[in-house]
Each structure stands twice: as structure tokens, then as C-alpha cells.
Image (cartoon, rainbow, N blue to C red):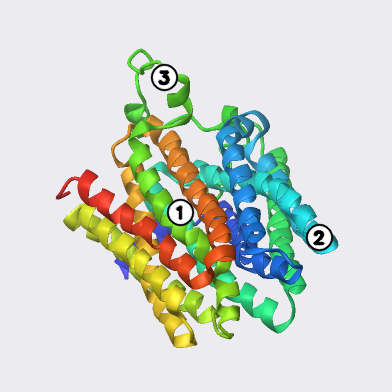
């Protein structure tokens, strides 16, 4: 009983009121975004868009989000985390509403650029606030819990999106995604207003509530570092002067980022074209892929770290990339619900494991004060892989069809497996 009490108290250090609200905001925001990733191609196809234009819609959004992320750090420090989160969510909501109001393919392509700007700003803001409010001595654990909201939405939202688009209509999928985004926006606004009201009511000099860990609204409001943070902080005299390239990118994260980009060439084609491919085969149960993918991802993810600790990065990287290639080939061959479900098993083992392996590689050997840049470098390559894969996949679909396109895109994760075998050292 005493151990259970200590465990509950320990979890309470992470699951503060602010953390739970922020995690809910992140879940709603990502849920709406992942619904669009799969449902918007169906909507555009109904409007008469070619496969190339469908892929281009994903590409322009991802590029806009990637560019926004490069500059978002400075914006967060200057204007405040919560304000930028609210602004990003507002832009996303307006973009989704505009997709429904203006059902024109060319207009949607332009709106996807604005959507990407909002997404880059909103998603970066939520992750930054999470890093601010999680106790430093529980940081990895807390960020793991926070990342579960992304995993859950990535696994469940596509199935919901396809079900709504096929059973009711693609425009209602847009309204559902809009509703999730507006819910996130309302929670963010309410949390900001309540936080300001609580700060105004707090007596001067008070230490604040012991149960509430307020997220800093600007860089100047970040609490002073504790002893552990001061010990990890670099001596300014010892920090090298970084080139303009190194200011925005971490060289040690380039290899894992580029390997993940090869994997995401295929992943981008899955999220963009799987519903259209299933429809062309007369299969209405493509949601089975995402349901199985969700279960396998959630079950296997806790074991990724143990696998890396035992075998190092090399074996998990090779296995995950080969499984990713397998899911692409099986999706291309799929002509039944059972086959799509089988592809979901390989997808959960492949894509989910690759994400965890390469992201850990990107930040494992960098100094604490370079982890933010390393993470940004990794996710920039991550996004570019999805953008390029969607664009190339769209071009191939118009020429060779869905099945051959998936076969061709499977070559990229195979290449990632070969490169991983060569460049990643054996052992831990």
C-alpha cells in the first residue's frame, strides 16, 4: 500500500492540472490534423483532383510547417508560448473551415500553405510548453506520456476520418476535424485566462499553489534552474561559436534524420493514398489498417527502449525499416480487409519502431543545450520525407497506379535499412 501511495504521488509530479489540460489540447489538435491527413485526399478526389494534386496538397502544407518551425523558436521567446499556441490553433481552425466553404481544388492548395503555417506554430508551441512544465528530474518520462497523445491520435483519427467520409460524406469529416481543433482552441484560451486570473489573485511574494506548475509565457518568465540544471548548463566561455548552419541544425542529428526521411517517403504515401487505393479495390474496411496499427504501436512502443538498450540502434533500425517496406508492399497487394489489417501489423512494428529509434539516435549524443536544435533537425527531415513522398507518390499514381506506386516507394525504407547496416555501429 505504501508503494502504491508513493507511485501515485510520483505520478502527481508529472500529471499536474496544467499538464493534463495541455495533453488534452495536444490530443485534440493532433486528432483534427490526422483526420485531415487521410480524409482531405478523399475530399479532394471527390472534387476531381488528380493524384498529383492530392500529393501536392500534402507537400505544400508540410513545407510551410517545416519553414515555420525554423523560425518558431524566436517567435515563442518574443511573443510567449501560450499566445503562439492560441494563434496557431486559430489559423488551423480557420483553414479547415475554409476547406468546407471553398470546395475548389486550387483554393484548397493555397489554403494548405496557411494551414501548414498554423500547424507548424501550434505543434511547436504545445511541445515547448510541455518541456517547460514537466519537472526536470522526470523529463523523459513526462515527455513520453505527452507523446502518447500524438500516438493515440495518429492511430485512431485516420480510422474515424475514413469512416465519416465513407458513411456520411467527406465534408462532415472536415466539420469533425474543425470541432476537435476548436475544442483545443477553447481549452487553450480558457487555460490562459484562468492562469492570468490566478496570477492576479496571488498575493505578492507568494510561492503559488503547490499543485499548479504554471507554464512560462515568455522566456523571461522561466523559473531559475535548480542545482541539477546548473550543473548541466555549459560554461559560456567553453561553448563554441556556431556557424549560421549550426545555429539552426545539429550535424549529429543529420544521419538519423535523413534515415527517417527515407522511411517517411513511404509513410507519406500511406497516409495520403491508402483510402483512395482501398476504394479503387472496392474495399470499404480500410479502417482495419489503422485499428491494428494503433494496437500494435501502443503495445510495442514501451519495449522499443529496452530493445535499444539490449542491442543498440542497429538491429531495431534494420528490422523497423524492413517492416516498413513490407507494409508498403502488402498495402499495394491488399484487396481485402484482412490484408489491410495484416499490413497494419507490419506498419505498427515498422514505422512506430523507426520513429522511436531514429529520434533517440538524434538526441542521444548531443549536449543538453543542443537537444532542442537536434530535435528540430530531426523533425525537419521527418516532415520533408512526408512532403517529398506524397509528391512523388502522387506523380507515380497518375502514371503507374496505386499498386506499383507502393512497390516503388518500398525501395526507400529498404535503402534506409542498408544505410543503417553500414553507418550504425554494432552493439550499444
Classed neighbour count for the residue bearing mark 3: other residues with Cα under 10 Å, few (<14), some (14–19), many (≥20):
few
Residue 123 visible in the displayed image: yes
Name the side, left or right, on which 426 lies relative to 60. left
| Label placed on residue 341 | none
Q: Residue furthest right?
A: 101
Displayed quadrant of residue 170: bottom right
Task: Give the residue displayed 67% in from the left and 63% down from the top.
Answer: 50
Q: Nearer the viewer, mark 2 or mark 1?
A: 2
Residue farthest toward the top in the current orientation of the protein: 237
Estimate the x, y position of residue 274 in percent, counting from the top left.
54, 71
* Residue sitting at x 21%, y 47%: 422
Residue 326: image x %, image y %?
35, 70
Give the distance between the C-alpha atoms of the residues marked 2 and 3, in whole angstroms: 46 Å
Identity of the residue drawn at 74% across and 56% down:
186
At mark 1, the secondary structure is helix
For this rendering, which residue is in front, 56 or 88? 56
Report how far apart the C-alphas of labels 2 and 1 lie in the structure: 45 Å
**First of labels 2, 1 by sequence position:** 1
Residue bearing the label numbered 3: 242
Left/right placement of residue 388 relative to residue 140 reads right
Q: CA distance from mark 3 to mark 1?
A: 34 Å
Question: Is disc 2 placed on a helix, strand or loop?
Answer: loop
Which disc, if any, is residue 14?
1
Cβ–Cβ under 8 Å for marks 3 and 1? no
Badge 3 marks a residue whose secondary structure is: loop
Viewer-nearest of labels 2 and 3? Answer: 2
Work out whether residue 323 or residue 217 is closer to the camera in this orientation and state it: 323
**Tags 2 and 1 touching, CB below 8 Å:** no
Labels 2 and 3: the sequence-earlier one: 2
Residue 379 versus residue 406: which sits nearer the camera? 406
* Left or right relative to 123: residue 372: left
Which mark identifies residue 104?
2
Amino acid at each position: 500500500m505504501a508503494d502504491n501511495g508513493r507511485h501515485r504521488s510520483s505520478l502527481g509530479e508529472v500529471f499536474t492540472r496544467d499538464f493534463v489540460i495541455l495533453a488534452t489540447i495536444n490530443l485534440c489538435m493532433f486528432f483534427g490534423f490526422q483526420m485531415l491527413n487521410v480524409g482531405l485526399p478523399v475530399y479532394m478526389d471527390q472534387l476531381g483532383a488528380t493524384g498529383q494534386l492530392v500529393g501536392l496538397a500534402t507537400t505544400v502544407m508540410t513545407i510551410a510547417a517545416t519553414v515555420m518551425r525554423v523560425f518558431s523558436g524566436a517567435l515563442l521567446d518574443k511573443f510567449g508560448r501560450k499566445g503562439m499556441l492560441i494563434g496557431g490553433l486559430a489559423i488551423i481552425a480557420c483553414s479547415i473551415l475554409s476547406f468546407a466553404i471553398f470546395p475548389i481544388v486550387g483554393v484548397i492548395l493555397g489554403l494548405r500553405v496557411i494551414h501548414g503555417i498554423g500547424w507548424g506554430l501550434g505543434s511547436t508551441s504545445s511541445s515547448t510548453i510541455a518541456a517547460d512544465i514537466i519537472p526536470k528530474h522526470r523529463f523523459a518520462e513526462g515527455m513520453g506520456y505527452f507523446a502518447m497523445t500524438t500516438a493515440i491520435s495518429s492511430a485512431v483519427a485516420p480510422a474515424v476520418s475514413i469512416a465519416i467520409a465513407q458513411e456520411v460524406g467527406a465534408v462532415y469529416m472536415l466539420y469533425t476535424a474543425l470541432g476537435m481543433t476548436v475544442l483545443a482552441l477553447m481549452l487553450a484560451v480558457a487555460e490562459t485566462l484562468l492562469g492570468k486570473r490566478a496570477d492576479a489573485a496571488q498575493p505578492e511574494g507568494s510561492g503559488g499553489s503547490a499543485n499548479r506548475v504554471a507554464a512560462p509565457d515568455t522566456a523571461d518568465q522561466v523559473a531559475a534552474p535548480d542545482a541539477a540544471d546548473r550543473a548541466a548548463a555549459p560554461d559560456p566561455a567553453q561553448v563554441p561559436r556556431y556557424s549560421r548552419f549550426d545555429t539552426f541544425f545539429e550535424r549529429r542529428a543529420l544521419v538519423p534524420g535523413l534515415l527517417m526521411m527515407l522511411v517517411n517517403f513511404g509513410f507519406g504515401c500511406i497516409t495520403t493514398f491508402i483510402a483512395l487505393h482501398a476504394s479503387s479495390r472496392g474495399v470499404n474496411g480500410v479502417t482495419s489498417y489503422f485499428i491494428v496499427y494503433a494496437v500494435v504501436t501502443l503495445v510495442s512502443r514501451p519495449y522499443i527502449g529496452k530493445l535499444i538498450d539490449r542491442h543498440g540502434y542497429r538491429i531495431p533500425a534494420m528490422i523497423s525499416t524492413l517492416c516498413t517496406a513490407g507494409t508498403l508492399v502488402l498495402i499495394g497487394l491488399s484487396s481485402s480487409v484482412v490484408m489491410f489489417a495484416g499490413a497494419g501489423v507490419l506498419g505498427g512494428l515498422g514505422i512506430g519502431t523507426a520513429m522511436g529509434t531514429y529520434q533517440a539516435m538524434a538526441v542521444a549524443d548531443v549536449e543538453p543545450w543542443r537537444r532542442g536544435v537536434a530535435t528540430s533537425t530531426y523533425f525537419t527531415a521527418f516532415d520533408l520525407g512526408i512532403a517529398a513522398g506524397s509528391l512523388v507518390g502522387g506523380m507515380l499514381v497518375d502514371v503507374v497506379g496505386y499498386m506499383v506506386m507502393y512497390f516503388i516507394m518500398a525501395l526507400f525504407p529498404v535503402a534506409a535499412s542498408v544505410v543503417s547496416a553500414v553507418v550504425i555501429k554494432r552493439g550499444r
